Image: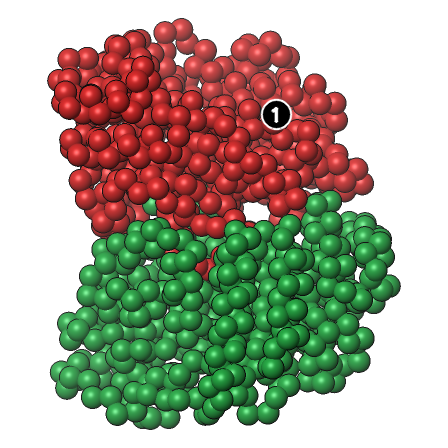
Chain colours: A green, B red
Amino acid sequence: MSALPTSGLDRGALAPELLQSLRAVLGDRLHLSEAVRRHHGASETHFEVMLPDAVVFPHSTEEVVAVVKACVAHDTPVVPYGAGTSIEGNTTPVRGGVTIDLSEMNRIVEVRAEDFDVTVEAGVRREQLNEHLRDVGLFFPIDPGANATIGGMASTRASGTNAVRYGTMREAVLSLRVVTPEGRDIRTSRRARKSAAGYDLTRLMIGSEGTLGIITEVTLRLHGIPEAILSAVCSFDNLSGACDTVVQAIQLGVPLARVEILDDVQMRAVNAWSRLDYPEKTTLFFEFHGSERYVEEQVETVSALAAENGGSEFQWSNLPEERARLWKARHEAYYAAVGLRKGCVGWPTDVCVPISRLAECIVETKKDIEAASIPGPILGHVGDGNFHVVFVVDPNRPEEMAEAEALNARLVRRALDMDGTCTGEHGIGLGKQDWLVEELGEAVDLMRAIKRALDPGGLFNPGKIFSL
Amino acid sequence: MSALPTSGLDRGALAPELLQSLRAVLGDRLHLSEAVRRHHGASETHFEVMLPDAVVFPHSTEEVVAVVKACVAHDTPVVPYGAGTSIEGNTTPVRGGVTIDLSEMNRIVEVRAEDFDVTVEAGVRREQLNEHLRDVGLFFPIDPGANATIGGMASTRASGTNAVRYGTMREAVLSLRVVTPEGRDIRTSRRARKSAAGYDLTRLMIGSEGTLGIITEVTLRLHGIPEAILSAVCSFDNLSGACDTVVQAIQLGVPLARVEILDDVQMRAVNAWSRLDYPEKTTLFFEFHGSERYVEEQVETVSALAAENGGSEFQWSNLPEERARLWKARHEAYYAAVGLRKGCVGWPTDVCVPISRLAECIVETKKDIEAASIPGPILGHVGDGNFHVVFVVDPNRPEEMAEAEALNARLVRRALDMDGTCTGEHGIGLGKQDWLVEELGEAVDLMRAIKRALDPGGLFNPGKIFSL
């Protein structure tokens, strides 16, 4: 990360009255040191580091309200921050201002096991939540890989490995508590499973990347831990055999809980990083959930399909520790990819296409990558039509950055031509703004109008999704 | 219906230039007759009839754009209209203007069986769609009972009997084509199964009841027709035994496809209306979907739970014609209820509460109804925590209207106290505006700000959801 260009070091200090107000609210939870600011200006990927002027760590929604009111009164931007695991520069404070780090708002407010829901503060991380829930037999399925905060996952409309069965943050969130640019503390919905009460503010806030409000609490739908969980690994000689297996399984109505594709390059990276010895070929990682009998039935169906499509025997397991090892390797796939080249950073792509076009989209992209000078392992949530290439680039070589950009452009164009999207789950942030316009045209003007209506000062995470 | 008060008969005519513009676009699909206007000013329920000034029947999105531009230029309201089956006065043209009836935009644009999706014009009805899909082995699950249009169902965020398994219109819609108050023709999303591309305009439009745009095309997610479908009927001596059975089944993870509750009064009405002879006790109607083996497993589990909770033996069937008869009776339950008293109209309620509170909410409500002077059968989508009372009132007796209103108020207050919603699936329309504010407080101001931003002239279905 340190190899990336940095700006904002010499930013003018905040207005003394603002600092005074912030200190009055937060005491020593107002940070001005370069180290803390640098941490909050960096990201996991290839974006320039840009420092905020200050970082605050509120402990309550009331403190967030006070921070927002103080900042707005001084025409100062605010940027919400969770675990810093976002991918498209979503938390980069491009106009400086105050980064509101919600990681200390990490209380699990209330578990309601009978209703299959839970209310958490925005800074709770998904692993923390699932550990907390284990004893009551419930789990929160959305799993973007990184141990992200629930608030951050809502902000970017995250999804990940379980989305094929359990949906994305769009489906997982029942209700949000949000601090608006006017400093209001609102709740977007009651706790009923469904409602037709006016505009869907919950879904409007999900994916708005902090540009319309700061999420401070999230009420989530939960699911019962299935009676039986079985994971399986299956390798293929080619990408299309793997894709066809998944498409056919979905068409037969098999409720796959997880199905991840990793190409040969990604498998080589995973083996090296996680000290495993899988065949270095295109591989599917599966997980099946249900009753013992139903899981057995699912595995029968899918293993037969895999065999017809040139897949290997299933290497399967129902042992928790083996499953954990498998998914840990999958979760570290991004770091494994970046680990392919020392001193390099990851440039992740994120298209999602209608599933009938997925095999074609992946195969064409693989050809591009094979002709490129930089490595680009492929991994994807293949049941949703969503996949990533992680280009591994040296940030000090402009020609590599340009090559990654050109390859990404070809990929996004291909996905749009297939009626797909430029971002399945990472959001727009800084990286996809031109593509958003390409994808949705004049509809983006409606988004701008909503932004202006709810944040007339343009102070909430400015410069993200679009420049006004 | 004719017993209801009527207004708008003597409305001033539209501006001659506007009529000329509309006639130029639509020819004889511009209607000014009282009969057509009256039809479009009435509703299925207890609201006053209010006539629009004109009704148009466009055949394309381009024609809708032309109508919108002409109306906006003459400061004239537009109200979209589908099948007229909404419940809360959602299509009542309170300020007159032009009602845009989309029922002749009823083409199924494209079925993409491999992607499990379909694009339809807004005027396609759900039964028409399912007949069309049957041959390809797919179905569209959302079923509000009435044979509504897909556009109307999106507008009100409809759901119904299958929501417990397949979700609501919120989950079913992939993308919308919408004509905005500025006369733009936009698409809210591409066709990928998931996307993080900016604000979720699809979900914003769903449930906005035509106040932000007119939906002209809808792309829907479809599902495979299950290998096995089994329906079952089970009666109980009391409401709480039935509710507990459902709650326990859901807690065990049984993926009920449908589970409907009908109380003794509703069962009496259904027997009389549909000439059936079910026991006139609290009854659950179930439907199970899956493989043969999996459906069998589900039925085993649920029938055991029912027995523990005082339920009768399951009266079950896997014959399509018996299932059809059962669900036809369920779908006619509203008319059956209204049929309990000649010359009367229905006043339907629509609360939804967290499922742990459902039994208590229904039992308390039943006590209110038993003490009332008007009948109020109860029926509900019990798996979602959503139920309806249909008060059957004589619209010429103000004391009955007042009693229904007071009973509804007690019910909504009870649901809000349980962190529920004033409307699970009917929308706000005219009937729930004060309750919306009660339910969501200042969040409603955000909705108003969005409305003003996207429809600054306030011409799109004015007076619905809120008065500005």
Image spot of residue B25 (x, y percent): 29, 25
Q: Quadrant of the C terminus of chain A?
A: bottom left
- Residue at the far front: name it: A371
Front-most of A139 and A465?
A465
Q: Is residue A226 visible?
A: no
Q: Residue at x 14, y 86 (%)?
A: A16
Front-most of B120 and B468?
B120
Front-most of A17 and B31?
B31
Q: Residue at x 17, y 73 (%)?
A: A75
Front-most of B101 and A286?
B101
Q: Residues within 10 Å of mark 1 (few under 14, many from 20)?
A: few
Image spot of residue A162 (x, y percent): 62, 60
Q: Residue at x 73, y 63 (%)?
A: A239
Q: Amino acid at mark 1?
A: Glu
B407 left or right of B252 in image:
left
Image spot of residue B63 (x, y percent): 33, 30
A44 left or right of B453 in image:
right
Q: Is residue B7 visible?
A: yes
Q: Which residue is mark 1?
A: B131
Label 1, secondary structure: give it: helix
Chain bearing tag 1 is: B
Image spot of residue A337 (x, y percent): 62, 80
Q: Residue at x 38, y 58 (%)?
A: A437
Compared with B77, A410 (above or below) is below
